[in-house]
Image: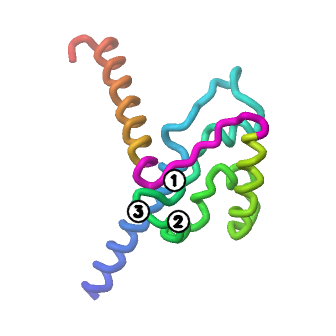
Amino acid sequence: LAYSMMYYFTAACSSGLFLALVFGLGHNGMATYDAESRPDFWKLQVTTTRNIIGGHGIPQAFVDWFCGGLQYQVDHHLFPTMPRHHLPKAHKLIDSFCKEWNVSYHEADLIDGNIEVIQHLSKVSDDFISEMVKEFPAM
């Protein structure tokens, strides 16, 4: 029983960590818009999400397995009901469409993507602390 409980908690915690990595990579550190300046739907989806690719010695096959289809985050946001086995085909079309219309389509590998997310979260927390010190000078 103890071994089963240990296995369950290890699996649950590691699954949560892996999901957080994939979701964080797909969304954190990307553009945000005010309601007044928000672009149309497709530009909003393309500029506020990031696709994950292989790189830094991490093969694309591992990224495909690890992310389970969410490595095509931009494509998933544009077509949320599309089955994930069709996302690679859609990716090629969406990429060429974005190039044709000169819309930034951001992709990063697992290493660079995590660096981008950590840098963004560091900036956000630094900005928060600066504002907090200004508002509460006793701190």
User: Type of residue at label 1?
Assistant: Phe
> Residue 117, can we see it?
yes
- Residue 26 horizontal side relative to residue 35, left or right: left
User: Type of residue at label 3?
Assistant: Gly
Question: What is the C-alpha distance between the residues marked 2 and 1?
Answer: 18 Å
Question: What is the C-alpha distance between the residues marked 2 and 3?
Answer: 9 Å
Residue 57 numbered mark, or none: 3
Please check the rendered image and state whether residue 102 is part of the magenta-colored stretch, yes or no. Answer: yes
Please check the rendered image and state whether residue 61 is part of the magenta-colored stretch, yes or no. Answer: no
> Residue 20, can we see it?
no
SS category of the residue bearing label 2: helix
Tell me residue 27's x, y (percent). 54, 45
User: Which residue occupies the foreground of this view, 62 or 31?
Assistant: 62
Q: Is residue 61 above or below residue 52?
A: below
Write down the residue under mark 2. 60
Name the residue rendered at 39%, 44% in the picture: 115
